[in-house]
Amino acid sequence: MATVMATTAAERAVLEEEFRWLLHDEVHAVLKQLQDILKEASLRFTLPGSGTEGPAKQENFILGSCGTDQVKGVLTLQGDALSQADVNLKMPRNNQLLHFAFREDKQWKLQQIQDARNHVSQAIYLLTSRDQSYQFKTGAEVLKLMDAVMLQLTRARNRLTTPATLTLPEIAASGLTRMFAPALPSDLLVNVYINLNKLCLTVYQLHALQPNSTKNFRPAGGAVLHSPGAMLDPLTAHSEWGSQRLEVSHVHKVECVIPWLNDALVYFTVSLQLCQQLKDKISVFSSYWSYRPF
């Protein structure tokens, strides 16, 4: 019995020494690694033109789709804003070609990119608030910090991977519809959003339901991408349509890959894995302290 207790005490002393090393050395090494990775991620969002304080450079992306050539165009991204858009739409019924572009005095903020960047900045702030001289005293303190950092990183990733679900009236009321010159026809709606590493542009064509239509009118709820047949109430959409009920007749979606968004998503995944690995190491020691054989 005494030998077993002595062995247990010796093992405990070794574990306590390893745990002190983990708190004093390895935790700070992981924090430094996380800072370096997230600073790289942050640089992807700023894309300065000249020097770290310079304006974000403009990047042109050609829109494309493997399923249709109805919509073609070029979007110009400048940091977290669309500074230019040049779009051609071939109308399905008569093959009429419509061209519309951003007015020169307009930019469209991509809130998803802005929010993701802000969450990364908050994660970096949390990490830098514990510099090399700071001494962690308990594993719970490390776990609390990792949870806070992971929350910000998860939110940053989710802003890029989970576009907002909008109703058709919300899209119609969006300021994006008033960005173009010439003005968009009243039977067109446009939406722009980020999905993973892609910048997506969707054009909806509308038509009025006939008063004698036998279709059961039911306004569509929120969605990332509405399908043909989705309906909307004109009272909450374009006033030009009067009291006529509207239906989506055609949907055209085109997209382009933003390489630095892909980089950012990889950095988020690696950072989350590092956080989880450190949490797991802390938890191993915590489970030992809670186990009492005698």
Image (cartoon, rainbow, N blue to C red):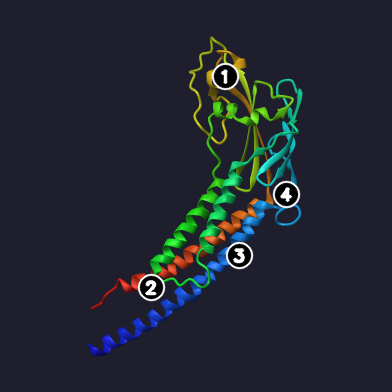
Q: Secondary structure at mark 3?
A: helix
Vertical arrangement, residue 29 with respect to residue 222, above or below: below
Q: Residue at x 60, y 47 (%)?
A: 196
Q: Picture quarter containing residue 95?
A: top right
Q: Secondary structure at mark 4?
A: loop
Disc number at residue 55? 4
Q: State how far apart marks 4 and 2 are (Cα).
A: 48 Å
Residue 2 spot, x, y in % from top left: 24, 89
Disc number at residue 246? 1
Amino acid found under the numbered disc labelled 2: Phe
Instruction: Answer few, some or many: residues within 10 Å of disc 4's Cα (few below 14, many 20 plus, some between 14 and 19).
Output: some
Sooner in the amino-acid sequence: mark 2 or mark 1: 1
Q: State how far apart marks 3 and 4 are (Cα).
A: 23 Å
Of 84 and 106, the residue lying toward us: 106
Sooner in the amino-acid sequence: mark 3 or mark 4: 3
Nearest to the eye among marks 2 and 1: give it: 2
Amino acid found under the numbered disc labelled 1: Leu
Q: Secondary structure at mark 2?
A: helix
Q: Quadrant of the C terminus?
A: bottom left
Disc number at residue 109? none
Which residue matches tag 2? 285
Nearest to the eye among marks 3 and 4: give it: 4
Residue 170 spot, x, y in % from top left: 55, 29
Q: State how far apart marks 4 and 1 are (Cα).
A: 43 Å
Residue 278 spot, x, y in % from top left: 47, 67
Q: Picture quarter containing residue 205?
A: top right
Nearest to the eye among marks 2 and 3: give it: 3
Q: State how far apart marks 3 and 1 are (Cα).
A: 52 Å
